[in-house]
Image: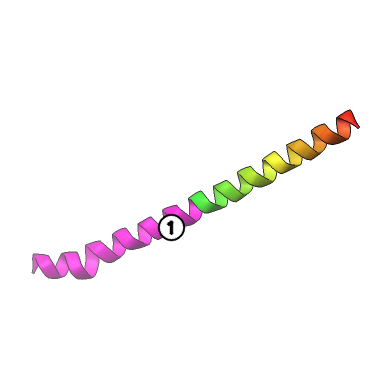
Amino acid sequence: RRVNALKYTMIPKLQRSIKWISLVLEERAREEFYRKKLIKRKKEEAYA
């Protein structure tokens, strides 16, 4: 019974959590990249 609970309930929940966390981290990385690019562009415009 416990093996079934782990196999069919806990492990899938943990896998979904891991996938969700990965997606959130990827999205944050994209936002950070965009933010840095925007700041760099504004600095270049200010010095030009």
Rendered residue at 88%/29% (across/down):
47
> In the depicted view, which residue is nearer to us: 31 or 13?
31
| Colouring scheme, one of rainbow, by chain, secondary structure, one colour | rainbow
What amino acid is labelled 1 in the image?
Trp
Residue 18, image x, y percentages:
37, 56
Q: Is residue 9 magenta?
A: yes
Magenta span includes 4: yes
User: Badge 1 is on which residue?
Assistant: 20
- Residue 21 is left or right of residue 47, and the answer is left
Q: Which residues are magenta?
A: 1-24
Residue 13, given in percent of the width and then of the height, sits at 30, 62
Location of residue 12 by image quarter: bottom left
Kindly give the residue lying farthest to the top in the view shown. 47
Residue drawn at 45 percent across, 54 percent down: 22
Residue at x 23% of width, y 66% of height: 9
Along the horizontal axis of the image, is 6 left or right of 30?
Answer: left
Q: Residue at x 74, y 36 (%)?
A: 39
Q: Main secondary structure of the magenta part?
A: helix
| SS at circle 1 | helix
Mark 1 burial class by Cα count in 10 Å: few <14, some 14-19, many 20+: few
Q: Name the residue at the right extreme.
A: 48
Q: Is residue 35 left or right of residue 22?
A: right
Percent x, y for residue 26? 52, 52
Across and down, in percent, residue 24 comes to 50, 52
Q: Quadrant of the C terminus?
A: top right
